[in-house]
Amino acid sequence: MAEATQEFGEWPLKRLMTAVVGSGPKSADDMDRAQAREAFQRILAGEPDDTTLGAFWLANRWKRNTPEELGAYVDVMHEECVDTVAPECDPVDCGANYDGKGRSAILGVAAGIVAAGAGTPVVAHSGDRVPTQKQDAYKHVLDELGVRTELEPQESADMVDETGFGFYYQPAFNPGIDALEDRRDQMGVRSFVNTIETLANPADASVHLGSFYHLAFAKKIVETAQESQEWTPDRVVMFQGMEGYDDIRPGYTKVADWQEGADLDDYEIETAEYGMDFEEADLEVDDVAEDSAAITEAVVTGEREDHFADAVALNAAFRIFAGGDVDSLEDGLDAARDAIADGSAEAVLEDLRAY
């Protein structure tokens, strides 16, 4: 048996690999909460050597983490890494995949600005070229728009209160996770860190909006919220997103909606019924950051009324709906389009640039 250490406990990663998680996809056991907590505390402290850490991350990937394990990881991240600074308002938290998009336009900035113009505050957070894909994320679209992104958490909170839309920058609010970037990059594949960093919730928002490839993942995120003691949203709204991002996929798609005290509600929508009557390929662009910024500005100023405008309006409607400011997606869509038509969305963009 590995010797206990005064700082941690009896479960160094090598022992967890040998005794619990490392025997293979079909025979591996799950960790209990205490084991998962200790494992991630050791990782954040930089204790495991690179080989052991890579093996542990890969074993977690092949066996698939339980909500109890993810809840433990999230709790340790919040306790030891996340600098939470809440604005005075209660925004919708959008934590899209930090490793970004490579083909289609990022619509979340435009959707968040439009939702803010309609009266629903929105927060987005991301890093800068996060492994494994290291593609364009929220930060890069905002950079192209001339909006400050390398902010301290208090500045991000103030941005939300002053403009209705806020951006939190991972190296500033979650430095412990940011410090793992080189070791994550050497892995070459995603680990559970890619999941939990989207749940950092630096604005302490009561509503989380995210995306999934399969409904089972949305259920796991909801169960993670139920298992976590630190990440306790009142509502989680998720949908099938493009490239794993929080931009809704055109066509027939699923939505998952959970509120504290209730069962998960999942249902299907046809986006064409909400004006999004085109294919995912129609949202592809040549330069994701640059083209997404240009699309954002053209849509929120009312200069563009094509399929990109329809996609932004529906994504904004989801944010307004998730925030509880309307009772249906239809009402959210009306509110989003009104915010563009009356100049409210454009005013938010102007305020962001001036901040």
Image: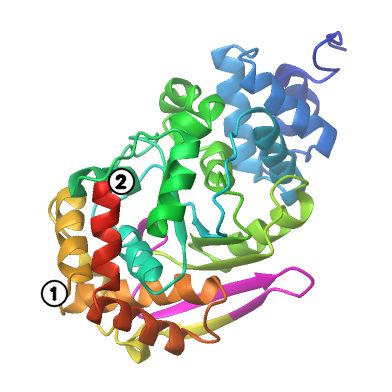
Q: Which residue sits at x=53%, y=32%?
A: 174
Q: 232 above or below 73?
A: below
| Mark sitting on residue 279 | none
Indicate the secondary structure of the residue bearing disc 2: loop
Identify the residue shown where x is 33% and y is 37%. Answer: 134
Q: Residues within 10 Å of mark 1 (few under 14, many from 20)?
A: some
Tell me residue 296's x, y (percent). Answer: 22, 62
Q: Which residues are magenta?
A: 243-266
Q: Is residue 20 magenta?
A: no
Q: Position of residue 275 (x, y in %)?
A: 30, 87
Residue 239 is situated, as x and y percent measured from the top left of the image, at: 49, 69
Using the image, determine if residue 71 lies above or below residue 216.
Answer: above
Instruction: Confirm whether the magenta stretch covers residue 256.
Output: yes
* Tag 2–tag 1 contact (CB < 8 Å): no
Q: Amino acid at mark 1?
A: Arg
Left or right of residue 51: residue 29: right
Query: How far separated are the C-alphas under marks 2 and 1?
Result: 25 Å
User: Which residue is found at the position 59% from the left and 59% from the top?
Assistant: 217
Q: Is residue 80 above or below residue 134?
A: above
Q: Is residue 70 visible?
A: yes
Residue 105 visible: no
The residue carrying pointer 2 sits among few (fewer than 14), some (14 to 19) or many (20 or more) residues within 10 Å by Cα, namely: few
From the viewer's perspective, is 46 left or right of 156? right
As helix, strand or loop, the secondary structure at mark 1 comes to loop
Residue 292 place in picture, x, y as percent: 20, 57
Which tag is nearer the camera, tag 2 or tag 1? Answer: 2
Kind of residue sitting beneath label 2: Tyr
User: Which residue in the structure is indicated by mark 1?
Assistant: 304
Snapshot quadrant of residue 128: top left
The residue where tag 2 is placed is 355
Quadrant containing the N terminus in the rendered view: top right
242 or 186: nearer the viewer: 242
